[in-house]
Image (spheres, rainbow, N blue to C red):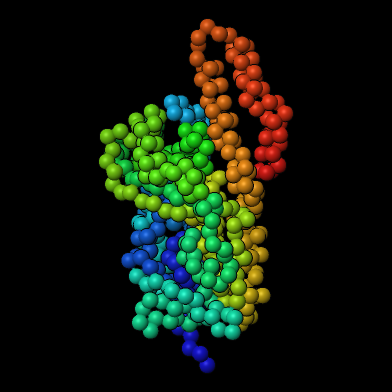
Amino acid sequence: MRKKDFDVVIVGAGPAGLAAGYVLAKAKVNVAIIERGTFPGSKNVMGGIFYRKALDDLMPDFYKEAPLERHIIEQKLWLISEDSVFSTGIRSEKFNKEPYNCFSVFRAKFDKWFAQKVQEAGALIINETVVKDPIVENGKVVGVKTDRPDGDLYCDCVIAADGVNSFLAKSLGLREKITPNKVAIAVKEIIGLPENVINDRFGVSNDSEGVTIEITGPYFEGMESMAFIYTNKNSVSIGVGTIIEDIIEHKVNPNDLLEKFKTHPAIAPLIAGGETKEYLAHMIPEGGYYAVPKLYTDGFMVTGDAAMLVNSVHREGSNLAIESGKLAARTYLEAREKGDFSAKSLSAYQTKMEESFVLKDLKMYRNLPHLLEEKRYLLTKYPQLIIDSMYNIYNVDGVSKPDKIKAIKERLKKDFGYWNLAKDMFTLWRKLG
């Protein structure tokens, strides 16, 4: 009889892997999590906003002890051109009350804390170890090969949480090679500023209240880009994410794009006097619902970024990862009761995911990536029209408001045509509805 080192081996100690490990360890499953970094979080990067609900379901009131930065009370969306900003968003005192909606975080601190909780629950985390291949016998995944001497580990089931480049999912034929139009590269800086300066500039009253600003528009010259500024306790996170296909076509260096963005007249005052503490870059899956692979095969499930689970419209990722890790772990527990880790048994994970908010949300926006590829002017011409129209309305220059509105209508007719406008609005309604 073949040896079994663990019941489950999880590859990757990010949010998905740690969530799966926590559920399994709590259920007294013998589980190991393989992490290539020196500690969980050492190689993990995200924009920096963490939504509470998915983890709170696992660890009630975790936010009272986790190393978080600020809870977010205001979320803004800016459309920017070279010299202007149109701003919208929501600020609510409901976001200023426990248990809070979301927080700014640093993954290196947060993942390390999360991993400690998973270890206390009983999971083994093996750091500084690279998984090189799945071990497949008779068509079933039965373990993984690592880069350690005699490092083959055998188990009932492998859960892949190895990130956007998941070679495990690719080697097992669950995922196709990532194409440049389905992944973004995000570059980010942590800029240190005193707490009182951040509070004043972002309009909050103390160092526990935070603000997010998501930014897009004609400033990015038709590239599918989204920039961001998030407040931390003693710093702000500022970054730009752009589809790699656009970076190639426009021959843009992502770092140059961030440096230019930092000089925008609406951005520069927010970071003035700050000192860059850290520079990070990360790939983000942006393919949406149609890029999500089959999530299981014999003895194997795939979670988190490895399963392309990112909702770029609402910049949600870590909460989707945690939910997928939880559901994969619960599927394993059901399979263990039956003693059946076949693809048929693990297909329950796919069903759970289809019934969860994760795939329901991604399905809602399933046509958006293709729509933005097809109609790039949605990112430039309409936002520019909005910015210019609002400038004209608010600019008191002796022209009457009825004449200004008439001019806006004439430009709308000239630039788009009422029929094309109606078609675009109908298309957006149909694609997003």
x and y percent of residue 278 in the render? 31, 49
Looking at the picture, tell me which residue is in the foreground, 64 or 137. Answer: 137
Eyeballing the image, is 408 above or below 118?
above
Image coords of residue 141 (percent x, y): 55, 78
Quadrant for residue 418, please give it. top right
Q: Quadrant of residue 122?
A: bottom left
The residue lying at 56 percent from left, 21 percent from top is: 389
Whether residue 205 is visible = no
Please name the residue shown 39% across and 36% down the image: 261
Picture layout, residue 32 above or below residue 260: below
Residue lying at 40% horizontally and 58% vertically, measured from the top left:
44
Q: Is residue 395 left or right of residue 199?
A: right
Count of numbered marks: 0
Quarter of the picture containing the C terminus is: top right
12 to 220, vertically: above or below:
below
User: Quick one: which residue is furthest to the bottom in this view?
Assistant: 1
How far across and down, in percent of the image, does residue 301 sit? 56, 70
Residue 145 location, x and y as percent? 44, 78
Foreground residue among 90 and 178: 178
Q: Residue at x 71, y 42 (%)?
A: 430
Residue 39 in sight from this viewpoint: yes
Nearer-the-camera pick, 199 or 389:
389
The extreme top residue here reads 398
